[in-house]
């Protein structure tokens, strides 16, 4: 009889393999397309010296009336509707992964983002929003009164 040393992590390897098998792209899972089911398009945001740039993946927009951009209390909200051809019968459908329908996504902007002169453009399925920074980004020292 040979002795096998105890390895507490051996079971984790089995669990990892089971998870990989369960969540593989070939088998349906609870989490596949979660962003789309929750109607939340993906967003990237970065800054330059003068502005913040928000990029949002929205493939399938056909006209500018299909998307709305609002800023309220320093929160940027992108919402709208993506139209898709729905003439396909369910029994003819083999796979549906592309999102269609209503969507909405909100992000909080940095405090020095200006709500004036915001510009937006849409090209190749990406909505790009340019938000200028306020000029008054300087620190202010507060005088303390000692009594």
Image: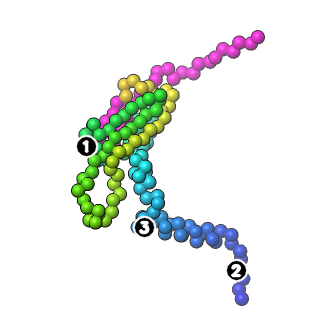
Q: Nearer the viewer, residue 53 or 72?
A: 72
123 in the magenta segment = yes
Q: Is residue 106 left or right of residue 139?
A: left
The residue positioned farthest toward the right in the image shown:
147
The alpha-carbon separation of the residues under discs 1 and 2 comes to: 64 Å
Tag 3 and tag 2, C-beta contact below 8 Å: no
Mark in the foreground, 1 or 2: 1
SS type, badge 2: loop
Q: Read off the residue under disc 3.
A: 27
35 in the magenta segment = no
Tag 1 and tag 3, C-beta contact below 8 Å: no
Q: Read off the residue under disc 1.
A: 62
Q: Position of residue 2 (x, y in %)?
A: 71, 86
SS type, badge 3: loop
If you read the primary sequence from the N terminus, does the residue marked by circle 3 or circle 2 appear first? 2
Quadrant in the picture for the C terminus: top right
Q: Read off the residue under disc 2.
A: 4
If you read the primary sequence from the N terminus, does the residue marked by circle 1 or circle 3 appear first? 3
Q: Nearer the viewer, residue 73 or 134?
A: 73
Q: As displayed, is residue 50 above or below residue 122?
A: above
Give the residue drawn at x 58%, y 71%: 14
Q: Which residues lie in the magenta part? A: 119-147
Mark in the foreground, 3 or 2: 3
The alpha-carbon separation of the residues under discs 3 and 2 comes to: 35 Å
Quadrant in the picture for the N terminus: bottom right
SS type, badge 1: loop
């Amino acid at each position: 009889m040979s002795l096998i040393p105890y390895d507490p992590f051996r079971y984790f390897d089995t669990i990892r393999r089971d998870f990989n098998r369960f969540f593989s792209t070939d088998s349906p899972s609870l989490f596949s397309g979660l962003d789309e089911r929750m109607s939340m398009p993906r967003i990237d945001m970065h800054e330059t010296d003068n502005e913040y740039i928000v990029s949002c993946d929205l493939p399938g927009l056909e006209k500018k009336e299909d998307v709305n951009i609002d800023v309220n209390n320093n929160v940027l909200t992108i919402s709208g509707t993506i139209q898709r051809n729905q003439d396909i019968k369910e029994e003819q459908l083999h796979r549906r992964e592309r999102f269609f329908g209503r969507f909405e996504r909100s992000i909080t902007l940095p405090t020095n983002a200006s709500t004036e002169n915001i510009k937006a453009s849409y090209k190749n399925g990406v909505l790009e929003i340019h938000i200028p920074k306020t000029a008054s980004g300087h620190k202010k020292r507060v005088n303390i009164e000692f009594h």
